[in-house]
Image: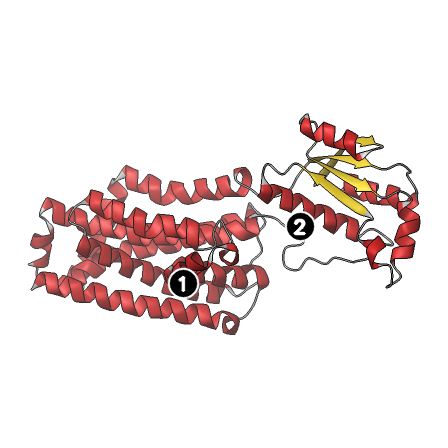
Amino acid sequence: MKQFLSFVIKETRHILRDKRTMLILFGMPVAMMLIFGFAITTDVKNVRTVIVTSSMDHLTQQAVDRLAASEYFTITAAVATPKEAELLIRNQKADMAIVFAQDFGAKMGESIHPMSVSKRKTLVQFIIDGTDPNMAQQWTTYATGVLTNTSGGLVNLKMLYNPQMKSAYNFVPAIMGMLLMLVCAMMTSISIVREKERGTMEVLLVSPVKPLMVVVAKVVPYMVLAFIILTTILLMGHFVLGVPLHGSIVWIYLVSTIYILLALSLGLLISNIANSQLMALLLSAMVLLVPIIMLSGMMFPVESMPKILQWLSLVVPPRYYIAAMRKLMIMGVGIEEVASEVAVLTGFTVVLLAISLAKFNKRLE
């Protein structure tokens, strides 16, 4: 046991001496949290809005006041015709225009009657700068949410779990999935391959400690670092970005432990395939980074992807971890509600660990 601990201490000291590794391990989580939390955000704020109405009755004024009072929209002008509003948008002086029907208040009262469906559809029109389709859709959603809650409106909208529609609620679990995978898999594979590249792995394997224990000793420090990173992200997400932790911390750490073991297994598998640090880095980038960003639901909803990409995403483990974290953290569900995600992650872990150990033993023979 003392020999095993000495190997763990050796690897830990090696990590602590490498300033570049330390910068990646501890600088990346903080930097990504700040970037995704404050810089790269899909939150709607201060959308330059033009009001189009020929008569400002009570309900119209009430709707405009609600728009102006929200942090999402800034009323920049009020015009009489849609053409004037469209001209402002074309001249980059506005982002969207909200066109209220003539006698909006009177028609609103009439449209409450269930037979007046046709009138109900023509009360408000949105004219939007569609150069960025995603943001245009966001503006429409936010404006609809504000207007449908207007007193006397047709619909009362209630947004569950994320009433302010903050993008940090979506990004924080995604960053957890990406960083834990990169740290555990990429850094572990590079660490083991570096020993092979320098010719020191053979020396370690002929030591009194069993070869398998040597590999375990090398991954233990990265497992500890993964939990430190996980804790850092949770603390920053909650206290800096205001992301709630409605679910049980115990279940969050338990599911994360399974995911960390999965990532370590994948790193061990990559180290068996790669013969150089460059190859390990390239394999990690192709196998991990691109699928995580594109297919895990981190940036784009899986449901919106073409069918073939949805099928490919089924073999991307971060997809299940990110989905489980969003449910546990944001929705506050119990472990039974993420049982399917946990089962898939456990299956991936068992399969990858078995393959990795089998290939490692084969190399020793």
Taking the spot 61% from the left edge, 42% from the top edge, the residue there is 135
Q: Which residue is mark 1?
A: 314
Residue 158: give its label.
none
Res. 76 visible in picture: no
Residue ranking furthest to the top: 91
Q: Quadrant of the N terminus?
A: bottom left
Taking the spot 30% from the left edge, 70% from the top edge, the residue there is 350
Res. 301 visible in picture: yes
**What amino acid is at disc 1?**
Leu
| Relative image position of residue 298 (x, y in whole percent) | 47, 52
300 relative position to 75: left or right = left
Taking the spot 32% from the left edge, 58% from the top edge, the residue there is 263
| Relative image position of residue 21 (x, y in whole percent) | 29, 42
Q: Is residue 309 above or below residue 78?
A: below
Residue ranking furthest to the bottom: 336
* Residue sitting nearer the eye, 104 or 69: 104
Element at label 2: loop
**What amino acid is at disc 2?**
Gln
164 relative position to 289: left or right = right
Q: Which residue is mark 2?
A: 164
Taking the spot 37% from the left edge, 65% from the top edge, the residue there is 258
| Relative image position of residue 114 (x, y in whole percent) | 86, 64
Crowdedness of circle 1 by 10 Å Cα count: few (<14), some, many (20+)? some
**Label 2 vs label 1: CA separation?**
31 Å
Which tag is nearer the camera, tag 2 or tag 1? Answer: 1
User: Hey, which quadrant is residue 115 in on the image?
Assistant: bottom right
